[in-house]
């Protein structure tokens, strides 16, 4: 990506000055922070348009938009290429682009599609060339190899460049840090959100996002579905868990605002999720519609606090979740399809005018009785700006044919689509246009930006200051006697061997998560007879079963809790627990540094609100 190295070095150089101010700014004025301007616009771009401007403009039909071009002044703007709009008035540039677009191109801006495998398909390229596809989503199944991701992104943007309308698509992924890392390969494995919550340093949130964003930017990825601002209301949740910063709403908002600013300074659009909040359920909306039985007052004063803060900060994107709030909506309609939750609460009451993007509409939690096409219509009418799909739809599949038919026949629906198309174009003018046509492409050697020495040093330091200790046993761990170390992760076992070369090792399976493999547990019990002290890595109920076996055998027990710490809580009255919040090697380095007494565990326990 042209000049990406320069942008990264400038951002890193700015870190010292920026992060020094974070704690004072964020802690003293969490609802009026000055980390970002309207919509977190990059420096030098125009301020956000008022929501009324977009809504009013959206009422124009195709012909009216074109015929009014001269009267409004945007007819003088050269919109023959998206890249010729640099320096133009933002409103005029949007209207000039809209005037060039027919119904299909306008509706196409609202679609974000994915593809199977490592290479984009001919069908996806058809969407880009024929309809000016608004966005492409990179999932984990596309992203085992960063070099192949870069190649795919390059071809996607080149296809857009060669289309009649050369408006570039957003390229998006889920790179939250920690547990959720859709782009794997050479990218950093980081301590994650709950580690940030444990250290409670806004600068940790900022720099985590800055380094993650730099890696995404090098790959040509311009939008990240993060930060996750779901609260750790139910610590046992297998869908949220360590993806949460904290159980505390205000702390979550403070850290999320800093995280979003770091992502912005790397040139990537941050998108907070899962609105209005996935924390108060243990169910996964990929397979079922979770029902959260709270009233609107509770929602406003708990789940929505981070969103209220981020809306005030101007975060550029928010993802709507497939979650039911029957006491608020009056039915089990998903939040992603709810006009009340999106238009009334988010747009009107919070004053948010950035992008609203659906979670994957192929998920079971989004299903409507009328099928996917009805879901898509309801999502647009509710106020979503981008519809995200985990596959490539056929060019004439029912979702598209239904929506384009409504666009041509229903003035109210057309106005709603045009409003979102304008909002998408506005975001692209702010975030993609400043990069230039070459700037949206991946770096020539993207792997050179991965796991930089600066980022590796930072993530190690962050892991150290986030490690949290609780329980009854004394730390550091006493020397001498036979030590048995058991765990499911290769990096945990490697770090144990490096720290305790004379210890015995026992590797057990991470999955199935709910129950230990019976043969493994029996073999572990046989190994216990030769050990005085046992160290067990607990990351799920299966790992907890091995810790229980050691406790039942009367051994000195030390727990390294990885990822979600709730599974280790039951051992706090018997042994010592050191909680880290990822399976990154840096996190396990921190855990063993605490066990050995090299460092003191200074992290807070983030599952207790207000701790």
Image (spheres, rainbow, N blue to C red):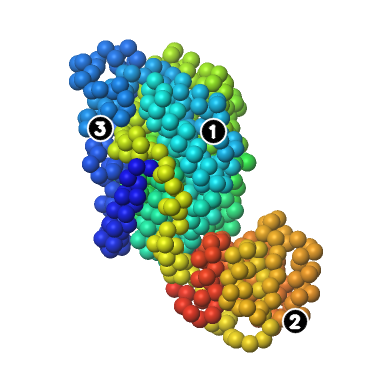
- Decide which of tag 2 and tag 3 comes sooner along the chain: 3
Camera-nearest residue between 57 and 453: 453
- 418 on left or right of 124: left
| Near-viewer residue (499 or 328) | 499
Residue located 76% across and 65% down the image? 520
Q: Are marks 2 and 3 in contact (CB under 8 Å)?
A: no
* Circle 2 SS class: loop
Q: Earlier in the sequence, mark 2 or mark 1?
A: 1
Residue 67: image x %, image y %?
26, 12
Q: Nearer the viewer, residue 442 or 380?
A: 442
601 to 406, vertically: above or below: below
Residue closest to the eye, 522 or 588? 588
Decide if residue 352 is in sight here: no
CB atoms at circles 3 and 1 under 8 Å apart? no
Residue at image coords 71%, 81%:
531
How many C-alpha atoms fall within 10 Å of the one at disc 1: few (<14), some, or many (≥20)? many
Which numbered mark, 2 or 1, is in the foreground of this view?
A: 1
- The residue beneath circle 1 is 120
Disc 3 from disc 1: Cα separation: 29 Å
Query: Nearer the observer, disc 2 or disc 3?
Result: 3
Picture disc at residue 530: 2
Q: Which residue is mark 3?
A: 86
Indicate left or right for 152 with 28 as reference: right
Q: Which mark is residue 391?
A: none
x and y, in percent, of residue 189 in the image:
51, 57
Q: Secondary structure at mark 1?
A: loop
Quadrant of image for the N terminus: top left
Q: Where is the C terminus found, in terms of image quarters?
A: bottom left
Residue 275 x, y percent position in the rendering: 46, 43
Q: Quadrant of residue 19?
A: bottom left
Residue 489 rendering spot, x and y as whole percentages = 63, 63
Q: Is residue 138 left or right of residue 164?
A: right
């Amino acid at each position: 990506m042209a000049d990406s190295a320069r942008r990264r070095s400038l951002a890193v150089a700015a870190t010292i000055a920026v992060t020094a101010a974070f704690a004072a700014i964020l802690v003293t004025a969490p609802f009026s922070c000055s980390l970002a301007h309207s919509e977190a616009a990059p420096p030098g771009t125009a301020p956000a348009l008022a929501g009324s401007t977009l809504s009013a403009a959206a009422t124009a039909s195709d012909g009216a938009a074109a015929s009014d071009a001269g009267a409004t002044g945007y007819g003088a703007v050269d919109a023959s290429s998206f890249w010729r709009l640099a320096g133009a008035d933002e409103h005029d540039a949007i209207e000039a682009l809209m005037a060039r677009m027919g119904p299909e191109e306008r509706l196409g801006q609202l679609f974000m599609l994915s593809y199977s495998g490592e290479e984009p398909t001919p069908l996806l390229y058809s969407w880009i060339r024929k309809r000016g596809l608004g966005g492409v989503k990179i999932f984990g199944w596309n992203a085992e190899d960063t070099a192949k991701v870069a190649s795919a992104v390059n071809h996607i943007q080149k296809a857009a460049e060669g289309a009649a309308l050369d408006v570039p698509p957003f390229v998006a992924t889920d790179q939250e840090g920690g547990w959720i890392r859709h782009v794997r390969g050479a990218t950093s494995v980081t301590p994650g959100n709950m580690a940030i919550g444990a250290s409670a340093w806004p600068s940790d949130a900022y720099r985590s996002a800055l380094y993650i964003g730099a890696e995404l930017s090098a790959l040509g990825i311009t939008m990240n579905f993060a930060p996750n601002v779901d609260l750790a209301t139910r610590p046992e949740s297998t869908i949220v868990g360590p993806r949460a910063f904290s159980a505390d709403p205000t702390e979550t908002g403070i850290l999320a605002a800093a995280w979003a600013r770091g992502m912005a300074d790397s040139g990537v659009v941050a998108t907070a999720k899962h609105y209005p909040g996935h924390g108060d359920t243990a169910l996964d909306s990929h397979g079922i519609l979770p029902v959260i039985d709270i009233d609107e007052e509770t929602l406003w004063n708990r789940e929505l606090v981070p969103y209220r803060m981020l809306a005030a900060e101007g975060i550029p994107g928010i993802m709507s979740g497939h979650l039911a709030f029957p006491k608020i909506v009056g039915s089990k309609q998903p939040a992603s399809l709810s006009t009340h939750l999106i238009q009334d609460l988010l747009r009107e009451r919070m004053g948010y005018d950035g992008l609203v993007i659906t979670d994957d509409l192929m998920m079971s939690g989004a299903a409507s009785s009328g099928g996917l096409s009805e879901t898509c219509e309801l999502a647009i009418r509710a106020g979503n700006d981008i519809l995200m799909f985990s596959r490539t739809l056929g060019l004439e599949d029912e979702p598209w044919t239904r929506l384009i038919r409504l666009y041509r026949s229903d003035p109210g629906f057309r106005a709603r689509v045009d409003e979102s198309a304008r909002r998408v174009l506005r975001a692209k003018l702010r975030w993609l246009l400043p990069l230039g046509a070459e700037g949206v492409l991946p770096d020539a050697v993207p792997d050179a930006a991965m796991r930089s020495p600066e980022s590796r040093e930072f993530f190690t330091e962050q892991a150290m200051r986030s490690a949290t200790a609780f329980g009854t046993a004394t730390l550091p761990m006493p020397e001498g006697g036979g030590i048995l170390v058991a765990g499911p992760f290769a990096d945990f076992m490697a770090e144990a061997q490096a720290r305790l070369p004379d210890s015995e090792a026992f590797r057990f399976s991470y999955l199935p998560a709910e129950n230990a493999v019976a043969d493994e547990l029996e073999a572990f019990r046989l190994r216990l007879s030769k050990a005085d002290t046992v160290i067990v890595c607990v990351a799920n109920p299966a790992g907890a079963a091995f810790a229980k076996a050691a406790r039942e055998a009367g051994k000195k027990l030390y727990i390294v809790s990885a990822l979600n710490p709730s599974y280790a809580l039951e051992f706090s009255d018997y042994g010592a627990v050191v909680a880290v919040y990822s399976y990154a090697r840096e996190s396990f380095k921190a855990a063993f540094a605490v066990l050995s007494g090299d460092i003191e565990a200074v992290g807070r326990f983030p599952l207790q609100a207000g701790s």
